[in-house]
């Protein structure tokens, strides 16, 4: 049995609503980031190189052209799609620019959803209202927030440039207006332990959230962390360690919360380590095995997070 048997996945949620799983088509809309352009800092987060996870990174193609290519790659797997603004900070521009790009992305009838990835400190009320305007048109809209950790010391260590309170403020404003939020967490960040992952989850759940994405820390070429890894100054999670921690987080998560992703991978030669992150499936299989043995989503809801 696969992940869908143990977890409330995005695919299952879409199938219930739309009759089929929706394929996310990733878009690089030429956004930048305040942590790169000098507004907050330069160099970005220490783990980041967008080229490691975005097919479209650096492309000169228009949004429509990127969506066309995405459809071709996904041919036969779906008839309905979600336009996913994935690269960098996709709310970091003037209102008119954002609206023009979002409008272009949803202009075709087979685009039924809009996912916008961004930082917690770059979401104004005006942006929230813009995204809600699409939702009011019947579009499936998700605001994806890269929190990574609820520990402010960790956020400073990895040069995020925002705090947990920045995240909390944005989530409360967005969800108060009815906008769905998906939060990203990274497991394996420097200085963090299994208990830190549980603490981050507890903070996210207490604030309120609609979806989660879990990622293993992996080292990619071009990131600041690549230098530390080459100098043997970093330890990374094994596949078994990651699967165990993800399984525990899933078991502490209420069943109504949708998991958009529970692992991630990168292609070589961009990926430097760990080796298991080169496979799309190895991490997923390990997680499913843990869930099969130790319990499914929500099975720890009557257990306090700090008691295990």
Image (cartoon, rainbow, N blue to C red):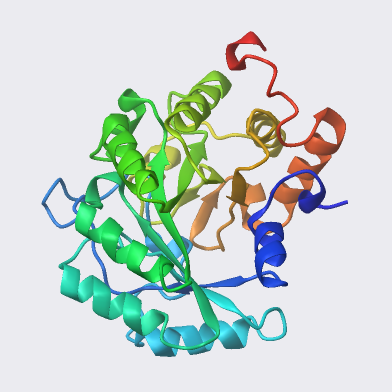
Query: Up-down: is 206 above or below 136?
Result: above
Residue 46 visible to an observer of this rendering: no
Query: Up-down: is 105 above or below 41?
Result: below
* Quarter of the figure with residue 58: bottom left
**Left or right for 75, reference 180:** right
| Residue 188 place in picture, x, y as percent | 52, 33
Q: Nearer the viewer, residue 96 or 236?
A: 96
Q: How many labels does the image show?
A: 0
Give me the residue at 74% from left, 41% from top.
Answer: 287
* Quarter of the figure with residue 278: bottom right
| Residue 107 place in picture, x, y as percent | 41, 86
| Residue 307 place in picture, x, y as percent | 64, 9
| Residue 57 place in picture, x, y as percent | 38, 72
Position of the C terminus, as image quadrant, is: top right
Query: Up-down: is 294 above or below 171?
Result: above
Give me the residue at 83% from left, 40% from top.
Answer: 289
* Quarter of the figure with residue 120: top left
In the displayed orientation, state which residue is furthest to the top.
307
Q: Nearer the viewer, residue 145 or 236?
A: 145
Give me the residue at 48% from left, 62% from top.
Answer: 53
Q: Nearer the viewer, residue 52 or 205?
A: 205
Residue 221 visible to an observer of this rendering: yes
**Left or right for 138, reference 306:** left
Give me the residue at 63% from left, 57% from top.
Answer: 10
**Left or right for 11, reference 94:** right
In the displayed orientation, state which residue is furthest to the left.
39
**Left or right for 80, reference 289:** left
């Amino acid at each position: 049995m696969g992940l869908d048997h143990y977890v409330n996945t995005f695919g299952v949620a879409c199938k219930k609503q739309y009759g089929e799983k929706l394929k996310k088509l990733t878009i690089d809309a030429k956004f930048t980031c305040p942590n790169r352009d000098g507004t907050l800092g330069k160099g970005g987060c220490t783990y980041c190189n967008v080229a490691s996870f975005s097919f479209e990174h650096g492309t000169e193609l228009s949004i429509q052209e990127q969506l066309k290519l995405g459809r071709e790659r996904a041919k036969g797997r779906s008839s309905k799609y979600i336009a996913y603004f994935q690269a960098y900070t996709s709310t970091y521009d003037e209102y008119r620019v954002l609206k023009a790009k979002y409008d272009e992305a949803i202009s075709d009838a087979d685009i039924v959803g809009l996912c916008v990835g961004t930082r917690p400190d770059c979401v104004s009320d005006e942006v929230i209202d813009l995204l809600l305007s699409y939702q009011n048109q019947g579009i499936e809209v998700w605001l994806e927030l890269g929190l990574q950790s609820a520990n402010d010391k960790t956020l400073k260590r990895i040069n995020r440039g925002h705090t947990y309170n920045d995240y909390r403020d944005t989530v409360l404003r967005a969800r108060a207006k009815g906008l769905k939020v998906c939060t990203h967490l990274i497991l394996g960040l420097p200085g963090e332990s299994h208990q830190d992952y549980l603490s981050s989850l507890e903070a996210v759940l207490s604030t309120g959230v609609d979806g989660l994405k879990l990622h293993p820390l992996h080292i990619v070429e071009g990131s600041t962390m690549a230098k530390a890894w080459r100098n043997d100054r970093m330890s990374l999670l094994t596949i078994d360690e990651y699967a165990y921690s993800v399984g525990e987080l899933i078991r502490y998560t209420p069943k109504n919360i949708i998991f958009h992703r529970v692992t991630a991978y990168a292609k070589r030669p961009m990926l430097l380590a760990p080796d298991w992150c080169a496979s799309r499936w190895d991490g997923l299989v390990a997680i499913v095995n843990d869930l099969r043995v130790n319990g499914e989503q929500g099975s720890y809801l009557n257990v306090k997070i700090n008691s295990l």
